[in-house]
Each structure stands twice: as C-alpha cells, then as structure tokens.
Image (cartoon, coloured by chain):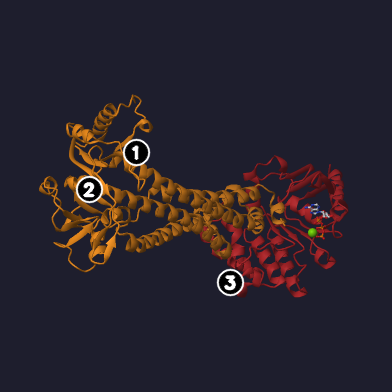
Chain colours: A red, B orange
Amino acid sequence: MPENDAPLIETKNLQKSYFNEELETPVLFNIDLTIKKNEFVAIMGPSGSGKSTLMHILGFLDHHTGGEYLFQGQLAHEMDEDTLSRIRATRVSFVFQAFNLLPRASVEQNVMLPLIYHPTIPESERAERVAKAIETVGLTHRKNNLSNQLSGGEKQRTAIARALVTEPDIIFADEPTGNLDSVSGIQVMSALQELNEAGHTIILVTHEKSTAEHAERIIELFDGRITKDTTEFKTRKAKEEDSLQK
Amino acid sequence: MLLKDTISAALEGLKRSRMRSMLTTLGIVIGVGSVVLMVSIGASFERFIVDQVESFSGDTFEIHAKGVQDIGKDVLSITFGDLEAIRGLTTVKNIAPAIFLTDRAKYGREEIAPMILGTTKEIFYNWSMKIDEGRLLSDEDDKGAKSVVVLGSQAAEDLFQNENPLGKRITIGARKFTVVGILETMGSPLTAELDSMVYVPFLVAKAIKGRTTYIDYIALQSINGDNELTRQDIVSLLRQRHNIDNPEDDIDKDDFYARSMEQAMEIIETVTMSITLFLGLIASISLLVGGVGIMNIMLVSVTERTKEIGLRKAVGARRRDILIQFLLEAIVLTLIGGIVGVIGAISFGYLISLIASKFLGDLTYALSVQAIILPLVTAVAIGLIFGIYPARKAAALQPIEAMGYE
Ligand SMILES: Nc1ncnc2c1ncn2[C@@H]1O[C@H](COP(=O)(O)OP(=O)(O)OP(=O)(O)O)[C@@H](O)[C@H]1O
Ligand SMILES: [Mg+2]
C-alpha cells in the first residue's frame, strides 16, 4: 500500500452490531476517530463498553457493520482477502486480552508465528528477530518452555513479543498489563514506549489511569460511543493555529 | 509463506495433537486394513478353488442324465446307443463310459461304502489321475471282464491301513476283486471324493447291475480343445437321438447334462466371486465405520483447530496458507494410516494363508491391485474431506470469530 498523506486510521460514523440468530446487538455507534502515525493512544472505558470490539475492527480482525473505516485513505470494506492478510502480516499486530497463544508450542515457536506469514522478512532474519523480541519482554530464560507451562504474566509477555517481532506500523494491545505485576507492567509499558519513540503507532486498552498516562492521547468509550477524546481539543487547537496562520 | 514453513506448520500441528493424529491414523489403518484383508482372503480362496478345478483338464467333458446326483435312485437317459453314436463323432477322444455301483467293499474286518465306478482306463486321463503303485485298469481287464480293482488313495488307506493292498483280494457285493493299482492322492478338499473312489472294469459293473440299455456317465475330451464345438456336436447328437426339439439351445429342456470342466469352472468362479464380493461388502461396511471414525476425530478437534486458524489468520496467514497446511496434515495422516493398514493387512493375510495351507494344501496368497487402491483412496478421501472441510469453513471466518469459537 502506498504511503500517502491520509491519516493512518480514520473512521467515519463507524458502527458495529453483532448478529446472533437474527438478533442484533449494536455495540458501537457513530465512532468518528482519526489516529495519525506515531501516536500513542489509550482507550479507556467500563467493561462491555466496546473497547475490544473497536480494537478488533481497527486491527482488521473483524469487520464493521456500518459507516467507514479508512486505513491510509483506503476503505477497509473494499479490500480483498489478500490485501487484508497482507495488512495483518505487515502493518498491524495484536496483543490479545486472552493471549491466544498456540497451545503446546514453545515461546519461541509462538513468537516465530507471524514471521512465517510475513511476505518480506527473509528467513535468515527470523532467529535474530525472535531472540530480540523475546529479550525485549525479558523471557529469554523461558524461550523453550511450552506456552501452557507459562504463568499468566509470561503468557502476556510472549504475546507482546509476538506482536513486536514483525515491527509493524501499529501495535494494538488489549490490556497488555492486565495480568502483570507492577514491575513487569512497567517493563512492558516502557517496551511499548520505546517502540512508539522508534516510530510505531501504539493503541492500547487499559483500565489503569497510570498505564494510560504513558499515552499522549486518551479516548474514553461509554456504551459504544466516544465520550471523551483528549486530542479532539488538541486537533481543534491545531486547526485554530492553522487558520490564524492564513 | 514458504512451502517449507507450511510443511513444518503441518508437521508441528500433527505433533502437537498427537492423540488426535494417532486416533485418526488408527481409524484409517482399521478401515483400509480390514477391506484389504477381507478381499485378499476372498481372492486367495477363489484362487485356491480355481487352482483345484484347473487340476482337471479344462477340455474334459462330463455327460450324464439329469438328476444323477441323487443318491440311491438312478436317473437314466444316456444309452449304449448314445455311447456308440458319440464314439462316431470326430471332435471327441478318450471316451470313458461309467456305471456306478453302490455295493460295500470289504477287506478282512474293514468295510467301507465307497463310490464304485465301473469304467475304462480313459477315465484316469480325463480326470488327470495318476497311478501310485501297480497299474491302471487296462483294455484287457475290460474285455475279459476281469475281477480287478484300482483304489483311490483314501479308499486304499481306509481298507488296508498300513498293509500293502497290491495283490490282495477284496469283496465288493458278492464278488471278490484283486487289487491291481492304487492311485496317487489328488490331495485337496475339492477332489477328496475322487480319492475315496474305487474303480472296476466297465463290463464288470455292467454285468453286476444287469444293464443292457442305460449307462450312468460318460467322460471324454474335446479333440482340439475347441470345447464349444465339441459341446454342440454332443448336444445336437443327443437331442436328435432323444427326440428333443431345442433349437434355442435351452439347457432346461434337455434330459442330460453335457458340459466341459471349463464351463463348470466358470460356474464355480461365479460362486467364489460372489463370496469375494460378499466379503468385500462386509469390509466396505468396516471401511464406512472407519470412515465415520476418521470423520468424528477430525470434527471433534475442530474447536481447537478453529482457534488456531483464527490466530494464524490474525498474524497474516492467507486462506490458502491455512488450506495447504491442513491439506498436508490430512494427507500425511491418511497416507501413513493407509500404508500401515495395507502392509498390516497383507502381512496378516499372508500369515492366515500360510496357516490355512497347512490344512488345505497348496494355497497361494492372492491380492489384486484394486483391492489395495480402492480402500486406500476411499479412506484418504474421507480423511481429506473431513480434515479440510472444517478448516475451509474456519478460514473463511473473521479472525476474531474463529478465535472466539467455543
Ligand atoms: N460475539 C459477540 N456476540 C454478541 N455480543 C458480543 C460479542 N462480542 C462482544 N459482544 C458484546 O459487545 C459488547 C462490547 O464487548 P467488548 O468485548 O468490546 O467490551 P470491552 O469494552 O472490551 O469490555 P472488557 O473491558 O470487559 O474487555 C459487550 O456488551 C459484549 O457482550
Ligand atoms: Mg475487552
């Protein structure tokens, strides 16, 4: 996908309903959101407010049911399967709330997984990237352990290493510190912060104010609607500056 | 994605779900193995029977009245006149007429009730029987109506046990006969009857039975191996002589049978073939059961595999990457299962044939290529369909849907 001036992520009146046997459960309403390259965004909100749902849609793991999602100016719902796969392989990665590791596979094998589907990273770089990602999350001593032999925090860190390994443009993290003690939590957050400083866009969901403070922008969701976006204000200010200059 | 990666993903998948892999393989081993085993047992049995029948010359003919098999009562239609007329045909040779006696045979305290055949020396050529000790019946025996007897090997054993029968005198009915020969064992269940028979000169039997018109049986051979021509000759001759109007060649209208061993063999082959088919049918049912087993195991693991598929898609796997991986997994499973099944069945079947040949005599293990290919293909197809179909469905889901699958 060509680089262009369009924002990395832009949603217009985005909506999502789940359908279970004809029964419609609307979960997201009128989401208008713009996220630019290299932002560090925290999404907060009560349980069930639709944070994970929104992340999944933005991370190309689920489709929306109304409105528009533009990824670098391209409409997501017009993308074909191969384009979606390629974006998942190269541009975005996900740290799931429920880890989602391969069972009975080692930490190394789990972290390796995205690399085998990556279209451009050569095989020769794999081992080094895996080792580096595992080191970043401090799991080098556990790299040969099977995923089901790990503690919750170790699983979380394995999932983070897996998300780092391809160095994607955007890393989505759904409560990445939810299962960690404060020390590991700080380790993970500083890893994410470093990635952000290196140019990656980070979007995370958190309950903790302290974690959210790593972000430069906080979006609050309530019952499927954005109730507060700290940069809306910033954007407006930027606009004012623009008009002043003219 | 490199092919290498797909292969290793498939192999890792199999390793990770070792139990499932083993059960699937087992299902296929049993499914394929039982079909191959059953069909090969059937085929070996068929081959065995055919071999037995083939020990007779295929161009030997048997002519007898219909219903002669019924013990105790004579069903007669072939006459001495018929015999002479048949002798006049140009397409026959080795004509051996026969009259059956139902008397008991005695030697000392031993007594047996054999089938006693009054016949001429040609019968031994027609039935491919060879002399073991002494001599066969001769033309002189017949012309002189001599009281001599040739014994089948079993009959000799039953009457004489360890004694040497040659030159001994046995009693048949009211007469004494001198044993002049003992036949070689035919040695198979199918021809056991011949081994228990006792052979006396034709004219002697004729005299004992007081026959002047009818004979029981004629064995002969076609002269140039053209069995159909010989059959037509005999049949039209006998129909003419018996005043049977039968232009449509309907065997049911005749009062006699005239058929070559070759034709008899065809009948036997249809019988054994239906046995093989029957065994094959039973085996197919077990293949079906095995197939349902394979199907179940494949489907039961779908939940876990669906999550895995969702995850792989989430990190960038394309639909075809998933499908190829699952295709490879299924191929490896089913092929290993299939090959183990085939090898197992062949070894087991061979073992059975070895044991069986101890009891039945020469039994060669027979197995056709189709009997291997067909079940193999079926099992592999079932494994593939039920290995891939759920994977295909899962791969079409949104990644998060697949991952959240419960
Ligand atoms: N597959 C589904 N089918 C129907 N409803 C769903 C489905 N997944 C989620 N929901 C509903 O959508 C709403 C939002 O769910 P979501 O997981 O996005 O919440 P969340 O903000 O991430 O909550 P939490 O903080 O507890 O993780 C919830 O009410 C949930 O019940
Ligand atoms: Mg959530």
Quadrant of the image where one finds ligand 1: bottom right
- The numbered dot on residue B66 is 1
Using the image, name the chain to which the residue with label 1 belongs: B
The amino acid type, in three-letter code, at marker 3 is Asn
The quadrant where residue A168 appears: bottom right
Some atom of ligand 1 lies within 8 Å of the CB belonging to the residue at label 2: no
**Quadrant where the C terminus of chain B is found in the figure:** bottom right
Q: Are marks 1 and 3 in contact (CB under 8 Å)?
A: no
The quadrant where residue A160 appears: bottom right
Using the image, name the chain to which the residue with label 3 belongs: A
Picture coordinates of residue B109, whole percent (x, y): 26, 67
Q: Which residue is rendered at x = 47% and y = 53% of the image?
A: B35
Give the Cα distance between marks 1 and 3: 85 Å
The amino acid type, in three-letter code, at marker 2 is Ile
- The numbered dot on residue A144 is 3
Given residues B106 and A166, the one toward you in this image is B106
Q: Which residue is rendered at x = 44% and y = 54% of the image?
A: B38
Of the image marks 1 and 2, the number of the one nearer the N terminus:
1
Query: Which residue is under mark 2?
Result: B208
Query: Does mark 3 fall on the same chain as mark 1?
Result: no
